[in-house]
Every structure is written in structure tokens, then in C-alpha cells.
Amino acid sequence: MVAIKDINDRSREIFRGIVETYLETGEPVGSRYLSRHLGVDLSAASIRNVMSDLESLGLLFSPHTSAGRIPTDAGLRMFVDGLLQVGILSEDEQSQIETQITQSNQGAGSVEDALREASMLLSGLSRCAGLVLAPKTESRLKHVEFVPMDARRALVVMVTEDGSVENRVIDLPQGLPPSALQEATNFLNAKLRGLSVADARRRLQAEIEQTRREISELTSRIVEEGFATWSGAGAPASGPDALLSRSLIVTGQSRLLDDVTAMEDLERVRLLFEELENKTDVVQLLGLAEEAEGVKLFIGSETKLFGLSGSSVVVKPFRDQDRQIVGVIGVIGPTRLNYARIIPMVDYTAGVVSRLLSRGPLS
């Protein structure tokens, strides 16, 4: 693809003027408009020649029979990467983002509550739809039980406070007395009831020596083996299954209808709604953004998923208290986004979420 350095200064200035005008108005930009407003000493005919050259490079195209041009997805990518001057959020905007996300989670707020609030806030500020890919909220343990199946195997049954029940089969050590399974059941329920699986696992690991002093060696082995089967249960460490175990939060879809002025705009939004319904593809796309250190942009046809609707995604990863990337947050809207404003907005919001999570798991 052509690079910004391959374009001379005059062509670059005209290209910048076309893209900035299009992002502001959503309308094709003509040579006559540019000759009057661009501030360059060029005739409309000279500007048309430059526009034609830019079109041949795949950076502009002429919709319908209009004499004006709009940027292609490749043109938008070159503009964002090489010409965009990213803005800075004001102190008032930073304070609004931080206050709204933090205050909404005082008291009984959960991680998902915090992320949903952050997504809704981004949606409102950007006039787009908000997106969050995050770990699923874990329910708290209500009851754990070891049920014998035969001499060498047992079923570990875990019941959570939301009423869900899951089972795992474990192997039993030789010489296990019949009372050991009941002892393991009593021990876990006394120690771990009311905790999430992740918190329960951390407590067991922290108290492993104390565990061995409170119950027999064989029973301790059953406890460790049984609970190990739940380590990351439903949340694989990597691969497609790891992504699909995430929670996808989409807010503010109705805002995408705010600027609809023509039937083609309505069709574009309809296609975007359909694309957002395909959770598997959306989650996998957002999972790619977790490999980025900063803000990640997917523009239009750069992704198969949002190519039909002509949409752009602006997202950034956020981290937990261990500084591990655990999800991404951002917005989705038409390719005609105010990138200079939305990029720092997403960047700052992801930072607020990371700081919130760094204080430890929310209740």
C-alpha cells in the first residue's frame, strides 16, 4: 500500500483537507470547495488532477455519480497513521470519566457493573456503541461435594449461589479411607463457601501447609486434586475457547441511528446490528486487540466482520491487579469517526478501568 512519505506536500495537503472535511460533514468533497477553503493557491482544475491521482492510488473514491471524493478505508488508515493529530482530553472530561466509573461501583458494584458503566459512558461521549470484552463474572460458591463413583474415581460437584451446578471427575489415591471424601467435603464448605472459584483457589494455595495440618495427608491430596479441576474451569488460558469464555458487553447501539440521513445509512446500521449479533466473530476480533500495547483501530474492510457495514472499531486493552491484560474496551461506529477525539477518550477510559481493577477484585 502507498505510504504517506510517497505523496508530495501538495497532494498530502489536499488529501488531508478531503479527509478532515469528510469526517466532519460525511459528504463527498469537491474541488471547488477545496479551492475556496483549503488555503492553497491552486485552481479547482489543478485540485481535480491531484484528486484523480489520489484516487488512482486507492486513497479516494467517488460515490455514485458525485464529482466529490471521499476517502477509502485504505485512505482513512493512511490518514490515521500518518496525518492525524490526536487531541487531548480536557481536565473536565478526564474528571467526568473517572468520577462516573468509580462512583458507580461504590458499594455493591461488580466488575461487570464497572465495565458496563464504562462502556455506556464511552457510548455517550462518542455517540457510538460501546464495546467491552471481559472475563465473565464468577459466581460465588455455595456448596462443594465429593461423591464416590468407584474405588478409584469420585465426582466433584460444585454448586454456586446463582444456582448453576457443574461436575468434574477426579482420580482417587490408593488406600483412601471411606471417610476421606466426606472430610474433604466438610473442609471445603467450611473454608470456601461464599468465595469465587478464583478467590477460593488463591486461599487454598496460600494456606496449603495449614490445610495439611487440619486434615489427613490423603484427604489433603483429594482437596488439592478436586479443586485443581476447577482452576480456570470454563476459561481456557489460550485459543478460541479462551476468547469465547469471555463476556461481551455492547451498549448504546441506538446511538448509531442518531446521524442516519439516508436509506443507505440505515442499511449500513442494519448490517452493523447483524454483525454485532455474531458474538463469536466479534469476540475473536476484539481478542486480537489484546496483543496491542496501546489503542488499536480496525477500519472498515480491514476486517471481514465489519467490512459490509463500513464500520470502525477503536479499542484498548485493560489490565487487572496483577498487570495482566484481561480484556479490551472501546467503541464501534461508522468509519466517519472523530478519531482525533475518540482515540484519547478510549485510551483514558481503559486506563481508568485498569486502575480500578488494580485495587483488587470488586465485590
Image (spheres, rainbow, N blue to C red):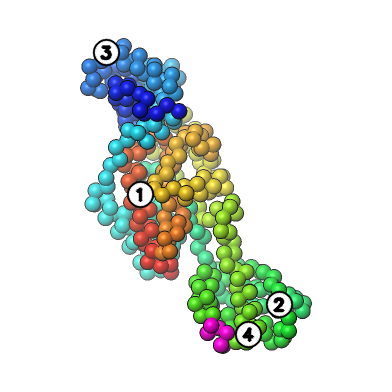
2 or 1: tag closer to the N-terminus: 2
Question: Callout 2, which amino acid?
Answer: Leu
| Amino acid type, residue under disc 1 in the picture | Asp
Asked which secondary structure carries label 4, the reply is helix
Disc 3 to disc 4, C-alpha distance: 89 Å
Contact, CB < 8 Å: mark 3 with mark 4? no
Question: Can you identify the residue that label 1 sits on?
Answer: 347
Q: Which residues are magenta?
A: 209-214
Residue 161 location, quadrant: bottom right
Separation of residues labelled 3 and 1 (CA atoms): 41 Å
Could you say which is closer to the camera, residue 78 or residue 264? 78
Outermost residue, top side:
45
Secondary structure state at the residue bearing disc 2? loop
Query: What is the three-letter code of the residue carrying label 3?
Result: Ser
Distance (Cα) linking label 4 and label 2: 13 Å
Q: Give how far across and how far down residue 192 sits, in percent.
A: 53, 78
Secondary element under disc 3, as helix, strand or loop, is loop
Tag on residue 291? Answer: none
Look at mark 3 in the image and give the residue it sits on. 43
Residue 13 location in percent, x, y? 29, 25
